Image: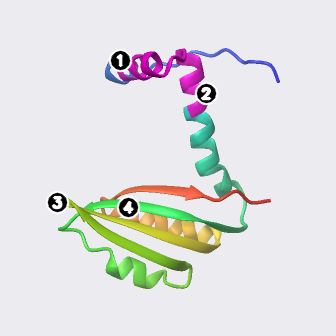
């Protein structure tokens, strides 16, 4: 597959971070951006069509935010749950399986309460 060239404007701090990462990994900016975009697309592409999906949701939140009610409301798609404290942060890893719309609803509720959330889907057919 060929390459498509396009320009983007990004914050100068992000640009500096990008250059530092590229230098430390021995890659050029284009390759770093390509890798990042592939990961981003993989993470969100599953939202384009309804399907049965499996993955993990990693949540970072302060001790002040309780997600127990949210998790209880979505227990039908949660297959396992790990919770740990690192310094003052609560880190939770939730294994999910079910309808992609339900997984997205859980993800959105977690985001709306101020948690840092990352959904990592397992590959599906």
**Mark sitting earlier along the chain (3/4):** 4
Label 1–label 2 contact, CB within 8 A: no
Specify the label residue 88 is tagged with.
3
Give the mark toward the camera: 3 or 1.
Answer: 3
Label 2–label 3 contact, CB within 8 A: no
* Number of other residues with Cα within 10 Å of mark 3, as a class: few under 14, some 14 to 19, many 20 or more: few
- The total of numbered circles placed on residues is 4
**Mark sitting earlier along the chain (2/3):** 2
The image shows residue 26, relative to residue 37, as above or below, that is above
Residue 66 or residue 60, whichever sits in front? 60
**Mark sitting earlier along the chain (2/4):** 2
What residue appears at the point 23 percent right and 68 percent down from the top-left corner?
A: 65
Residue 93 or residue 99, whichever sits in front? 93
- Secondary-structure class at tag 3: loop
Label 3–label 1 contact, CB within 8 A: no
As for residue 32 lying within the magenta part, the answer is: yes
Specify the label residue 60 is tagged with.
none
Task: Specify start and end residues of the magenta stretch as a single range.
Answer: 15-35
Label 2–label 4 contact, CB within 8 A: no
Q: Is residue 4 left or right of residue 70?
A: right
Residue pointed to by mark 1: 16
Residue pointed to by mark 4: 59
């Amino acid at each position: 597959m060929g390459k498509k060239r396009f320009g983007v404007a990004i914050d100068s701090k992000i640009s500096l971070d990008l250059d530092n990462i590229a230098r430390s990994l021995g890659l050029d900016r284009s390759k770093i951006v390509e890798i990042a975009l592939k990961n981003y697309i993989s993470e969100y592409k599953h939202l384009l069509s309804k399907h049965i999906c499996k993955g993990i949701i990693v949540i970072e939140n302060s001790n002040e935010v309780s997600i127990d009610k949210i998790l209880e409301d979505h227990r039908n798609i949660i297959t396992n749950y790990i919770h740990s404290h690192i310094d003052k942060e609560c880190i939770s890893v939730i294994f999910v399986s079910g309808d992609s719309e339900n997984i997205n609803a859980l993800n959105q509720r977690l985001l709306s309460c101020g948690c840092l959330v990352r959904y990592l889907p397992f590959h599906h057919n």
